[in-house]
Image (cartoon, rainbow, N blue to C red):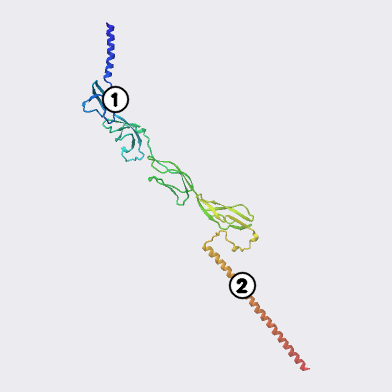
C-alpha cells in the first residue's frame, strides 16, 4: 500500500509542473505597428481588462477562443543604430550634433549618453528598442576632416610660391626657393588631418645673349664672371673656338646660352688694330643705343681726321708747286741779267780799242 501511494505521489508531483507549464506557454510577437490577431479569437484582454480589438502596442495579452484562451505578448522592435563621430562638429555646437546615427527605417529620436552609454529619450511608447553600436562613447572613432592636395610642380618666382587648398579655412603654404618639399597645411589637429604631399619648385630659365668673347694668342682671358653666373670655356690656348658652359650662382636660376656660345682665340699676327680701337669684349653684340652713339661718334671722328689729312696733303702739294715755280723764275732772271752785263762789258772793251 505504501509503495502504491509513493508511486501516486511521484506521478502527481511530475504532472503538476507539466500542466502549469502548458497553461503558461506564451506566444511571442515583435512589434510591427499592425494588429496582432490570434486565430479563432473571440475577444482580447490585457492585464488591465478587456480590449475592443486586437492589440498593436507592446505588452502581455490574452485571447479567448472556443477551445479556451491563448496567452501572447508583443515585444519592442529592435532597431540597430550605427553611431559615428560627426567630423564637422566643433566646440560650441550642441551635443546632439556630436554624433551621427545611421539606421533602417523612418525614426526620430534624441541621442543621449548615460554613464558613457548611448540611450534614446524616445522609444515610441516602448514599442522600439534602439540598439546602439558601439554602445559606449569611448568606442566611437573620432574622425577628422581630411585635407588633401595632389603633388604639385612649379617654376621659381621672385615673389614666392603660394599653394592653396580647396578648403576655405586652410591657410596657404608659402615656399620661396627651388627644391623638393613634403608639406602639410597648418590646421587645428583636433578637427582636421592634413595629408602630406610633395611640392617641387624648378629653377627659372634665363636666356643669355653673350658678347663676342675673343683674345689673341698669349693674352689673358677676359673676365668671364658676373654677379649671377660664371662662364667656363673649354681648356686650350691654341688658335680656334672653345665652347662655353655656364654655371649659375643661385639654385633658383638656370642659364641657357642662345647667342655667341664660343670663345675665340685669334692669331697674334692678325693683331693690326690699334689697342684703343679693339672691340671691348664685355660689350654685347647688340649694343645699346648709347653704345651705338659712342661707336658712331668715333667713326665720325675718324672720318673727319681722314678728311683733314687729305686736305693738308693737297695744300702741301699746292705750296710745293708755287715754291718750285718761284725758284725757276728767279733763276732765269739772274741768267738774263748776267748775260746783259756780259754784253755791256764786251761792248765797252771793244770801244776802247
**Label 1 crowd bin: few (<14), some (14–19), many (20+), radius 10 Å:** few
Assign a secondary structure to mark 1.
Answer: strand
Is label 2 or label 1 in front?
1
At 27% across and 10% down in the image, what residue appears? Answer: 8
Q: Is residue 27 above or below residue 247?
A: above
Q: Nearer the viewer, residue 43 or 201?
A: 43
Q: Say whether marks 2 and 1 touch (CB < 8 Å).
A: no
| Left or right of 313 on screen, residue 149 | left
| Left or right of 89 on screen, residue 350 | right
Q: Position of residue 266 (x, y in %)?
A: 63, 58
Q: Position of residue 55 (x, y in %)?
A: 24, 28
Assign a secondary structure to mark 2.
Answer: helix
Q: Nearer the viewer, residue 216 or 292?
A: 292
| Residue 29 appears anywhere in the view | yes
Q: Which residue is mark 1?
A: 28
Which quadrant would the N terminus be assigned to in this image?
A: top left
Seen from this angle, which residue lies furthest right? 353
Q: Position of residue 147 (x, y in %)?
A: 40, 42
Q: Which residue is mark 2?
A: 310
Amino acid at each position: 500500500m505504501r509503495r502504491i501511494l509513493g508511486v501516486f505521489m511521484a506521478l502527481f508531483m511530475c504532472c503538476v509542473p507539466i500542466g502549469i507549464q502548458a497553461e503558461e506557454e506564451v506566444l511571442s510577437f515583435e512589434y510591427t505597428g499592425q494588429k496582432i490577431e490570434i486565430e479563432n479569437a473571440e475577444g482580447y484582454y490585457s492585464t488591465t481588462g478587456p480590449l475592443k480589438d486586437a492589440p498593436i502596442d507592446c505588452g502581455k495579452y490574452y485571447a479567448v477562443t472556443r477551445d479556451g484562451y491563448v496567452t501572447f505578448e508583443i515585444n519592442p522592435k529592435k532597431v540597430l543604430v550605427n553611431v559615428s563621430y560627426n567630423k564637422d562638429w566643433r566646440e560650441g555646437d550642441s551635443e546632439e550634433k556630436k554624433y551621427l546615427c545611421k539606421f533602417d527605417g523612418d525614426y526620430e529620436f534624441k541621442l543621449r549618453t548615460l554613464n558613457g552609454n548611448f540611450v534614446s529619450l524616445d522609444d515610441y511608447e516602448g514599442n522600439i528598442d534602439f540598439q546602439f553600436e558601439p554602445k559606449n562613447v569611448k568606442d566611437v572613432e573620432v574622425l577628422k576632416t581630411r585635407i588633401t592636395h595632389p603633388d604639385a610642380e612649379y617654376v621659381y618666382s621672385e615673389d614666392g610660391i603660394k599653394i592653396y587648398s580647396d578648403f576655405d579655412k586652410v591657410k596657404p603654404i608659402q615656399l620661396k626657393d627651388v627644391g623638393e618639399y613634403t608639406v602639410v597645411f597648418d590646421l587645428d589637429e583636433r578637427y582636421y588631418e592634413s595629408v602630406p604631399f610633395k611640392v617641387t619648385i624648378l629653377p627659372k630659365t634665363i636666356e643669355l645673349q653673350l658678347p663676342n668673347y675673343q683674345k689673341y694668342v698669349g693674352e689673358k682671358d677676359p673676365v668671364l664672371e658676373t654677379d649671377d653666373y660664371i662662364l667656363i670655356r673649354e681648356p686650350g690656348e691654341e688658335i680656334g673656338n672653345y665652347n662655353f658652359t655656364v654655371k649659375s650662382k643661385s639654385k633658383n636660376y638656370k642659364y641657357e646660352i642662345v647667342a655667341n656660345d664660343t670663345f675665340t682665340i685669334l692669331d697674334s699676327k692678325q693683331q693690326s688694330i690699334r689697342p684703343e680701337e679693339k672691340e671691348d669684349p664685355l660689350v654685347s653684340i647688340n649694343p645699346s643705343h648709347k653704345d651705338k652713339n659712342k661707336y658712331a661718334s668715333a667713326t665720325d671722328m675718324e672720318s673727319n681726321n681722314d678728311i683733314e689729312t687729305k686736305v693738308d696733303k693737297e695744300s702741301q702739294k699746292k705750296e710745293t708747286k708755287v715754291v718750285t715755280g718761284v725758284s725757276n723764275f728767279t733763276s732765269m732772271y739772274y741768267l738774263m741779267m748776267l748775260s746783259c752785263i756780259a754784253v755791256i762789258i764786251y761792248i765797252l772793251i771793244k770801244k776802247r780799242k
